[in-house]
Amino acid sequence: MAFDDLELPSGSFKDVVGGSATFAGLAASTFAPVRVVAVIGDDFPEATLEEMRKREIDTSGIERASGKTFRWAGRYDADLAGRSTLDTQLNVFANFAPKIVPAYRDTPIVLLGNIHPALQLDVLEQVRAPKLVVADTMNFWIQGEPKTLAALLKRIDTLVINDEEARELSGTHNISRAAREVLRRGPRRLIIKRGEHGALLFDDQGIFAAPGFPLENVIDPTGAGDSFAGGLVGYLATQPDITPLAFRRAMVHATATASYCVEAVGTTRVAKLVRADIADRVMAIRALYDYGAGSMS
Amino acid sequence: MAFDDLELPSGSFKDVVGGSATFAGLAASTFAPVRVVAVIGDDFPEATLEEMRKREIDTSGIERASGKTFRWAGRYDADLAGRSTLDTQLNVFANFAPKIVPAYRDTPIVLLGNIHPALQLDVLEQVRAPKLVVADTMNFWIQGEPKTLAALLKRIDTLVINDEEARELSGTHNISRAAREVLRRGPRRLIIKRGEHGALLFDDQGIFAAPGFPLENVIDPTGAGDSFAGGLVGYLATQPDITPLAFRRAMVHATATASYCVEAVGTTRVAKLVRADIADRVMAIRALYDYGAGSMS
């Protein structure tokens, strides 16, 4: 969990509550009860935790450490297509070792946020036989911790990365071949996020393409990927079985969730999301695909 | 119609038959009879014209001028994501003024290739009340001939451009807003091609997203956009009415057509395409979207 200082085309915003666990937790809570594991400093507002609890988010796994909360400062390009990091202050995150509280040990679906793969493995040691483990990672760990990451890949069901990360991890430019190589290393499924171009799911059934939802007003892309992952696991938590088709529907719900996230600064929109919002946008996403029933000829 | 000298990751290829009219004509002929208007020099092989005629392509509108055929030389990046032009020789294309032969005047569907918008307008003056006019253009005309292009936009049904061109034409980065602005200027429909990320159709029904088909072996992207346009109008020529749903199905058939094109050098693959090939790939593209019938919840 974090504070973000954001320089957006629409203005500058300081001390915006952010962080992967915050975005993913809020997003997932639109669908199902959520348990969050994270660290905050003594400057983190209790009111935010209270808001989360009102959304059926269990915050007992959030550790309040002495010191300041993690902080990221970034500047987005005028067209929001790229961003540069202006400052990163690890603060209490520097010594974070996720502790899974007893009440969390039987959590059926585990989303491992983007931290050191050794810590991700450590979390998996602390939970009991989850039915689904989804993990995020990034170039920093792909380059710096290839062996630990390789061990993690053998322990997870689904890896969620972006196209550049898939290319780097596999050493292959072609995205389909890169996906095949990543799947060979362990995970049953790979999701490749492609920003405004949507996301691809690769599994033993083939490939599923969730389109990006064409938005007219993108305000803040921060947290879009985390909201996608949160929406994905949140939707899957509502399903009796994690079948290939349920996973495909989850991709569409994840897309819907992320599309709302970027329409406001920080967690503003995702913190208020309800299932009816998701249903509306899922309908709109389905319309993107609609060429009528029946024959294609 | 052209000769291309291609430097591809798989090797260098000289005197490859290419050109927008060639790719689009061959692609469209997979679906319906085609009439081609183009110019070639005396170096262009009669055998290629004969191959085209075997595919129900009427070549009587192809003018053989004294001199050399248009030539383009280009080098693709190792990952085929970008390319640079090494040489362009206009040759007989420099003085080309499309002449619509009498037998062509009642052609119901007209695809205007990417040439000077004044010449595109001139072609429209020579045809009688086509039921569909689709036009391509490029940055060069958007920047250099804005007024003539504006006049053209008022005369066409559908504009086919890529995302950068849509941004440049509209002066807007956001792709949905850019599309709205382009539609405000005349065309009923706008197709925005996004390479491997597929293509978007904007019309009065909303937005349709045709996914890029994830290929494992991309050999030569030359002509992909022209094959897309050819597949689009070819499919539409088979339809009794150009309804919004027929146009959406055409987007999928166009995607299938283009996906074959890039699997071989030049026109090699597109020159052999049959409807059964298209049907196979359309099935594969539909599978990319398939999340099962019924409820999304």
Image: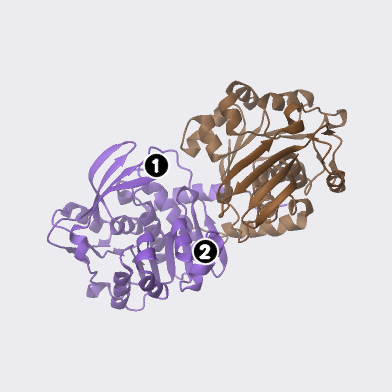
Chain colours: A purple, B brown
Label 2 lies in what chain? A
Residue at image point 39% right, 65% down: A142
Residue A149, horizontal then vertical, whole percent: 38, 70
* Mark 2: secondary structure: helix
Residue A173 against residue A272 in the figure, above or below: below
Image disc number at residue A80: 1
Label 2 belongs to which residue?
A178
Let me know if residue B119 appears in the view.
Answer: yes
Distance from the alpha carbon under mark 2 to that under mark 1: 27 Å
Q: Is residue B11 left or right of residue A8?
A: right
User: What amino acid type is highlighted by mark number 2?
Assistant: Ala
Query: In which quarter of the view is residue A76 placed?
Result: top left
Q: Is residue A181 left or right of residue B187?
A: left
Query: In this rendering, do the residues under marks 2 and 1 share a single chain?
Result: yes
Dot 1, crowdedness within 10 Å: few (<14), some or many (≥20)? some
Residue B226, horizontal then vertical, whole percent: 68, 43
**Figure label count:** 2
- Which one is nearer the viewer's eye here, A86 or B28? A86
- Which one is nearer the viewer's eye here, B220 or A200? B220
Position of the N terminus of chain A, as image quadrant, is bottom left
